[in-house]
Amino acid sequence: MLMDKKELIEKVIDNKKVIKKVTGGNTQTFTSFVIVGDKEGKIGYALGKSRQSYPQATQRAVAKAKKKMVDLKLVNGTIPHPVSAKYKSSKIIVMPAPEGAGIIAGGAVRDIMSIIGVKNISVKQLGSSNKFTNVMCTIKALEMIK
């Protein structure tokens, strides 16, 4: 029995070039932070690293993210009740919004909401503006939905 896989949407949140001083000179590595979703409540995230290039780091991150997919509970394009979470120095408050409100969020959190398939939501980010911690905090909050 063959199951057709749903098409996953990949979104690169952050690319960084890391240069490290070592005895023989400098080493250079590339990191890529990626989220993957199916617009039906599933999302995965991962950090990929490579010594060669950004595309290779992105491919590794996508492969890891597909393995770490999380299923979230959505009701009519929004969440059933408000939730909040804290991860390191980031705090996220996620609230359901009425029909037609759209995605009221900024930065990486907006990308997460569109990839999960949420149509109406309001999000407040407090504390850090770090993309990685905001993504982790948002997913932690969404996992707490009953």
Image: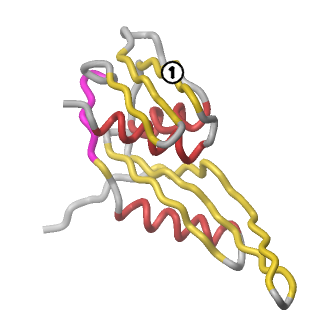
Indicate the position of residue 54 as horizontal and vertical percent values: 69, 67
In this view, 66 is above or below 110? below
Q: Is residue 53 above or below residue 37?
A: below
Residue 12, given in percent of the width and then of the height, sits at: 60, 52
Q: Main secondary structure of the magenta part?
A: loop
Q: At which x and y percent is residue 124?
A: 51, 21
Q: Which of 127 and 10 is in front in this view?
A: 127
Q: How many marks?
A: 1
For the N terminus, the quadrant is: bottom left
What span is colored magenta in the figure? Answer: 71-77
Which quadrant, please, contains the C terminus?
top left
Q: Disc 1 on helix, strand or loop?
A: strand
Crowd around label 1: few <14 · some 14–19 · many ≥20 (10 Å): some
Q: Nearer the viewer, residue 7 or 40?
A: 40
Q: Which residue lies furthest to the right in this view?
A: 25
- Which residue is found at the position 32% from the left and 39% from the top? 40
* Residue, far left: 1
Residue 70 within the segment the image draws in magenta:
no
Q: Give whichever of 114, 93 is nearer the camera.
A: 93
Residue at (65, 64) in percent of width and height: 31
Name the foreground residue: 9 vs 128: 128
* Residue type indicated by callout 1: Lys
Residue drawn at 39 percent across, 28 percent down: 118
The residue at 49%/63% (across/down) is: 62
Q: Is residue 22 above or below residue 37?
A: below
Give the residue number, with chain letter if any, for mark 1: 124
Q: Where is residue 107 in the image (x, y as percent from the top left)?
A: 61, 33
Instruction: Look at the image and say whether residue 74 sits in the magenta stretch.
Output: yes
Give above or below for 109 relative to 30.
Answer: above
Judged left or right of residue 81, residue 33 is right
Name the quadrant containing residue 30. Answer: bottom right
Looking at the image, residue 36 sits to the left or right of residue 72; the answer is right
